[in-house]
Image: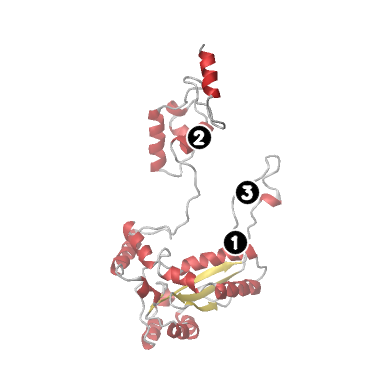
Amino acid sequence: MAIYNLKKAVESLPPGTVPPRKPGSGAPKKTSPRTDKIMRREVLNDPAITAAELKKNHPALLGNVSVRTIQHRLQISLKLPTRRAAKKPLLTEAMKKKQLSFCKRYRQWTPEQWKKVMFSDESTFRLVRMASTTVRRPSDVSRYHPKYTVKTVKHPDSVMVWGGFSGNKGRGGLYFLPKNVTMKGANYIEVLRDHLLVPYAIHECEVFMQDSAPAHRSKVVQKFLTDNNIPVLDWPGNSPDLNPIENAWNEMKKAIAKKRPTNINELKQALTKLWVEMDLSYFTKLATSMPKRIGMVIQYKGNMTKY
């Protein structure tokens, strides 16, 4: 009679509906609610801990539980799946305080005010850039097959680029440092003279943004900027989340990775083309994102944000 009733109940379900599991059927859970709670607490305390390490740390609770079951419990039941960690620079407490202080000082600035800032920065572009580190490989093929490996170069050729933009008129100057040349006060002044002064005037900017690199803070550079009536933001050091040009560099690096230039000349040509083709609306969006960036830094008390 029970079998007949179950069959009748299943037949009455709408097409495509999975029948409910019969109470008491299937293997019992390998972990108890208490064990799940302990695993969750450990993972929240140490996000990098592995299922194998959890098993090793708790032989009495997880000795008879497979690593795969622990992984499944973490991912499905406890909603703690493995994710690739974001790479962010290490911030000291002093750096956090400076970043927080800067944000509180400029929290009242409007998007229109930030559009009148000429943002600048340097970035290094390499010929070989790490591609995706994950691939889909058939189980019967060696992981060392060339098709499924990520190619690396010990010392790839690279070029350092200086660039600037504003939310008013978009891209500004772009300059490639000569090979084996380090940015110092003297040559930085040449960069500013040749690639900042004219765009700064054309863009109708009212303030200049540069980070706190030693070359930028040198007395000769400060005098040059003062002599040319260019106010400078007191930008906190090591704060890439705040500088919107970092987003432009990142987009360019993604594009370069797809183009795969084979020499420095091709790399420079590709970078110049990408820079020229960047739309004004993109730079305006970056500049006017500053209030949100500042708000998030304040919210996270000087720590890194999604930017």
Foreground of the two, 249 or 219? 249
Which residue occupies the extreme bottom position in the image?
A: 227
User: Eyeballing the image, is 87 above or below 99?
Assistant: above
Q: Which mark is residue 262?
A: none
Identify the element where label 1 is drawn: loop
> Is any part of residue 169 visible from this angle?
yes
Q: Are marks 2 and 3 in contact (CB under 8 Å)?
A: no
Foreground of the two, 210 or 24? 24
**Residue type highlighted by circle 2:** His
Mark 2 lies on residue: 72
Mark 1 lies on residue: 129
Nearest to viewer (mark 3 / mark 1): 3
Q: Position of residue 222 (x, y in %)?
A: 38, 82
Q: Which mark is residue 135?
A: 3
Q: Which comes before the other along the chain, label 2 or label 1?
A: 2
Nearest to viewer (mark 2 / mark 1): 2
Foreground of the two, 189 or 196? 196
Real-space CA distance between mark 3 and mark 1, rounded to the nearest whole angstrom: 16 Å
Which residue is drawn at the image coordinates 50% and 85% (left, top)?
194
**Residue type highlighted by circle 3:** Val
Picture quarter with the C terminus: bottom left
Q: Which comes before the other along the chain, label 3 or label 1?
A: 1
Q: Which comes before the other along the chain, label 2 or label 3?
A: 2
Identify the element where label 3 is drawn: loop
Identify the element where label 2 is drawn: helix
